[in-house]
Image (cartoon, grey):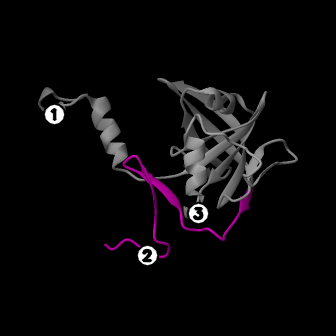
Amino acid sequence: MTHPETLPSEPVGELFRAAFRAHPAGVSIITAMGPEGAVGLTASSVASVAVDPPTLAFSVTSGRSASHIAAAQTIVVHLLGSGQLDLARTFADPSAPRFTDSMDWEVLPTGEPLLKEAAWALRCEIIHRAPLGGSVLLAARVLDIRSNVSDSTPLVYHDREFHTMLAGVPAVA
């Protein structure tokens, strides 16, 4: 419990948003096959949960793509490299056309849409769904991984903007 003398002067929700705007996150696109075809969205909430079995977690909010992804049995989580900035922007814009003929994508034999240019693609089975506020937290077991090592510099989201990182440049202590 918070003591009255340590209560923030701003509402906690605003401070929470500010804290996470200042904390960079990797950029991913999550895809699934919905009843009317392929759906996808850009996400910065993907996190590794366990190695054995390989498990990840992410959250989705409202929207057509989000509801189909939350209901899917299997999905593909695409971890993006710096060369996929346009792809990230396309899937972040709810009005942008997705899965067009000009995009390099295919439907896997298992039924999920795969964006071929992503640095990493993790095909997953949803194993847990938990509604939290206006979001749904999903845990997924990784079934298969594909790598496109030609783009190993990650794309990150920080302070409401996409950024790239310098590959091979470690942080200085």
Q: Residue at x 48, y 56 (%)?
A: 156
Q: Which residue is mark 1?
A: 6
Q: Residues within 10 Å of mark 3 (few under 14, many from 20)?
A: some
**Does the stretch in magenta take in 116?**
no
Residue drawn at x 36%, y 48% is 159
Residue beneath disc 2? 169
Query: Dot 1, how many residues are within 10 Å of its Cα: few (below 14), some (14-19), or many (20+)?
Result: few
Q: Are marks 1 and 3 in contact (CB under 8 Å)?
A: no
- Taking the image as shown, residue 155 lies to the left or right of residue 100, namely left
Q: Residue furthest bottom?
A: 168
Give percent across and percent down for residue 142.
70, 49
Q: Is residue 30 left or right of residue 12?
A: right
**Residue type marked 3:** Gly
Residue identifier under label 3:
83
Distance CA(mark 2)–CA(mark 1): 38 Å
Q: Is residue 123 left or right of residue 88?
A: right
Q: CA distance from mark 1 to mark 3?
A: 44 Å
Q: Which residues are magenta?
A: 145-173
Q: Residue at x 37, y 50 (%)?
A: 23
Query: Mark 3 or mark 2: which comes first in sequence?
Result: 3
Q: Please name the amino acid that badge 2 sits on.
A: Val
Quadrant location, the C terminus:
bottom left
Q: Secondary structure at mark 1?
A: helix
Q: Residue furthest left?
A: 5
Residue type at the position of mark 1: Thr
- Can residue 48 be seen here? The reply is no
Q: Nearer the viewer, mark 2 or mark 1?
A: 2
Q: Secondary structure at mark 3?
A: helix
